[in-house]
Image (cartoon, rainbow, N blue to C red):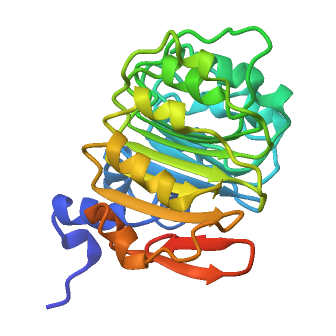
Amino acid sequence: MNTQLEDLSNELLLDILDYIKTEDLVSSFWNLNQHFNNLIRSLKYLSLIVKKTDTLPSSLFSQQIVRVVIVTLIDIQLDSFVNLRSLILNIATENHIKQIQPHILPKLAYLSIPIVFESRVTKQLASEIFSNRFIFLRYTDLNLINIPNIFSWSQSPSLHSLHLSSSNINIIPLLLQSCPQLIHLQIRIIDEHDFDPTSLLNLSEHPLRNFLFIQSQPSTFVFNIFPLFSIIPNVKRIDFRLCTRSFIDLIQLISKSFSQLTCFDCHIIEYPNKDEHIDIHQIRNIHSCYSNIQCTLREDCFCLYTTKRTLM
């Protein structure tokens, strides 16, 4: 006896439909019959990838779509996706950015904009994000954000994970102040500025758990991030990619400052190379998290220390 797709139970059919792209649901199953229409209408968590040549099915399923990935420069109206939770702009225009507003996407929980826009484009968006206008937002990747000329941020207690780049290291205290429940911070600093420790005076102990600090361009400039350690003592995971004058002094300070440290990764250049006779085993014995540290490259004037887990 032959079994047709329609002979399967609704539960099995829904499981199958869950694995099918939204655009394929439209082209292959929508209006096949009323039974399939009803099943598709019952799907609650549809995901949509918008490419250049796609015909948007938003008019049919906009209220069911909770995740949108944009990979096109064509104009897309986001206001129809009233239940959108996740928005990823792999390719985007200024018009796309301007639509990311609390009244348009009130349920947004995940926002990723990995491409670089001019600061004027993202300035207003940053102000709304770090002032709790998106009350459900938990994760954001904003790429380039700079310190506002007039500090217009308040607080965004919903944010738990933040990835961004900035031209000025002094944005870090502002981020910690604006995100009191932040657990994960990954920041790439693209310009050379001295850190101002007075910016920490009004900050209390922060619950940050993961701290990834990346010095963007190869440089012998040393960021003095040591004062930061005192306000983030709960950090458990560290990944540093930077330049330092003394590698062993740095990791000794890290081991003393973070009693809960469970994971340490690095891509650290020591310049100039002062500790020519440091035994790698001595370094690894400072803390159990340092067991993967290795001296990857040693030259006359510098030494590169890395961990096996570090991905560049």
* Position in image of residue 189 (x %, y %): 70, 44
The residue closer to the viewer here, 125 or 87, is: 125
Answer with left or right where residue 277 lies relative to residue 190.
left
Residue 21: percent from left, percent from top:
48, 63
Q: In the rendered view, does 285 fall on the left or right side of 147?
A: left
Q: In which quarter of the image is the C terminus?
A: bottom right
The percent coordinates of residue 211 (x first, y second) are 46, 45
Q: Can residue 102 be seen in this view?
A: no
Residue 129 placement: quadrant: top right
Q: In this view, does 146 lie above or below 152?
A: below
* Above or below, comparing residue 148 to residue 263 in the picture: above
Quadrant that contains the N terminus:
bottom left
Q: Can residue 267 be seen in this view?
A: yes
Picture residue at 52% right of the left edge, 18% below the top: 178
Q: Residue at x 57, y 66 (%)?
A: 267
Residue 180 against residue 311 in the figure, above or below:
above
